[in-house]
Image (cartoon, rainbow, N blue to C red):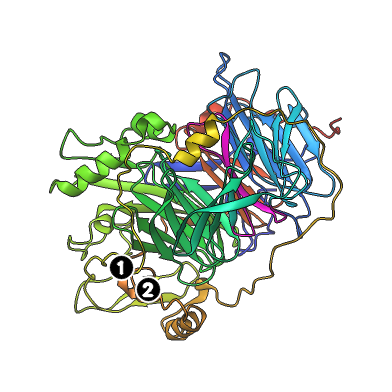
Amino acid sequence: MATEGGGKEMNEIKTQFTTREGLYKLLPHSEYSRPNRVPFNSQGSNPVRVSFVNLNDQSGNGDRLCFNVGRELYFYIYKGVRKAADLSKPIDKRIYKGTQPTCHDFNHLTATAESVSLLVGFSAGQVQLIDPIKKETSKLFNEERLIDKSRVTCVKWVPGSESLFLVAHSSGNMYLYNVEHTCGTTAPHYQLLKQGESFAVHTCKSKSTRNPLLKWTVGEGALNEFAFSPDGKFLACVSQDGFLRVFNFDSVELHGTMKSYFGGLLCVCWSPDGKYIVTGGEDDLVTVWSFVDCRVIARGHGHKSWVSVVAFDPYTTSVEESDPMEFSGSDEDFQDLLHFGRDRANSTQSRLSKRNSTDSRPVSVTYRFGSVGQDTQLCLWDLTEDILFPHQPLSRARTHTNVMNATSPPAGSGGTNPGSNGNSITMPGNSVPPPLPRSNSLPHSAVSNAGSKSSVLDGAIASGVSKFATLSLHDRKERHHDKDHKRNHSMGHISSKSSDKLNLVTKTKTDPAKTLGTSLCPRMEDVPLLEPLICKKIAHERLTVLIFLEDCIVTACQEGFICTWARPGKVGLLSSQNQANSPSGTVV
């Protein structure tokens, strides 16, 4: 599969690439897919998604992998760079009728070698809680679709909680559930808890506590993805209306917002230290947003179509502070941050406030993040101190080791950034603009929280436990809520001549909000433009997964192939085991 393409330059799929760390290499024997390895016909189906969990068992091989392909859901031991994948022995396999799995999430807090809690969202709106090790279905939420009838777009356990989880739908609503509570036999009644600009939060009004505990209505159109901050206190949401909205999760306060250049935002992620958020979407751009300053600090242009996933690489990200008291940025520290815990709730905030209150500047800051898109390309990006601290001279901007001029040129000169598609993007010859002010049109809560959880949440968690009978999914007509979007406004083919025309299109589309040119959505020339370290075509079908692990990078495409890319120096672990198993038998 990896060598197809017939030698044509445009169709040639890359199996390795080099960055400053060294050579990343695709491991064909570590490819996971359906047991028959047949490419999945992906027309009209939901994106392939991958979830990982580590069971911390004594064997040293505790990694487990879950992925959905069409109507099917698989659960495997993940051997990564250590050993070839054995597709003949999935731990669990499920095939659904009338609805398709769309997303899933493991509870890392409760996972053991004997039991693991996996949430699965579906195209018809239900959420299932299953244990793929015990092979049992414990609960089904929104079974009668009384809470929401639209497709589940994102489901995640609330960080630090064994029982709370959050579900987003294409209706634009999010719901907070407790696994111990029932969903009731009637449609829920709500009462308003809090309202703000383009969002409202309601509590469920009933005599006995039931699901959902909270209903969030966010923006217009589908809520495509959300992500909790590393400390678990903040929630970043991206919607089809093109807005990023960041909330304080416990106090239900809007912290800040951002608008895409045009089109919907499809994906979002946090930096390991919680200081930056990266989004991707239908403008073919990746956008870097500062959590502290609530403003866009950079955009990245490399994709030729919609960006489907963005993710930070905590193992390559590094921060070296001049002040030894500040965050050292070792891999262990970053991993501590990634293991969400309520006890670390104030650590990120204290570092943020300390960074802002002192004049000390880091000696070297580099955040590595990646993106994959519908153009079948993987891009890696470096976010360096010249972008993070724009008051410093940017005449010699370094965004990666090749020293491409990835930001606005110095005053008095015109600069040209070579685009990955052969076109050139001309940047006006102006000096770097001063930091944009915070938008005054939106309510901003204080960064630090009072420390007390919402009384609504407290009440919801502390209320009585109700037993919920296990029920099966019924056959239902599959509902397609995906709209057919046109692709004629692709950022991949913008040249200096077409940029004015694009601005006009964007203005008419977002005219009611009048956001272009404001701090919500600065113009292209007003923020640095990053270029990718690498931009490689790695699949035949659109890419839907990008996950950074310690030894490797994991990607997946809509054909249902989950690929493992060994990090530099890790490729030798598998070289002695080139006996790849190619099972052809079916799984019962």
For the point 33% across and 43% down, which residue is it? Answer: 449
Q: Quadrant of the C terminus?
A: top right
Residue 524's disc is 2
Mark 1 sits on what residue?
440
Residue at image point 41% right, 78% down: 514
Q: Earlier in the sequence, mark 1 or mark 2?
A: 1
Q: Residue at x 55, y 57 (%)?
A: 217
Residue 82 percent location from the top left of the image: 57, 26
Secondary structure at badge 1 equals loop
Report x, y in % for residue 315: 40, 37
Q: Considering depth in this image, is 31 or 236 the residue closer to the camera?
A: 236
Magenta span includes 340: no
Labels 1, 2: front one? 1
Q: Find the residue positioned furthest to the front.
A: 207
Q: Nearer the viewer, residue 21 or 58?
A: 58
**Which residue range is magenta in the image?**
148-172
Circle 1: is it few (<14), some (14-19), or many (20+) Cα within 10 Å? few
As drawn, the label of residue 378 is none
What kind of residue is marked 1? Asn
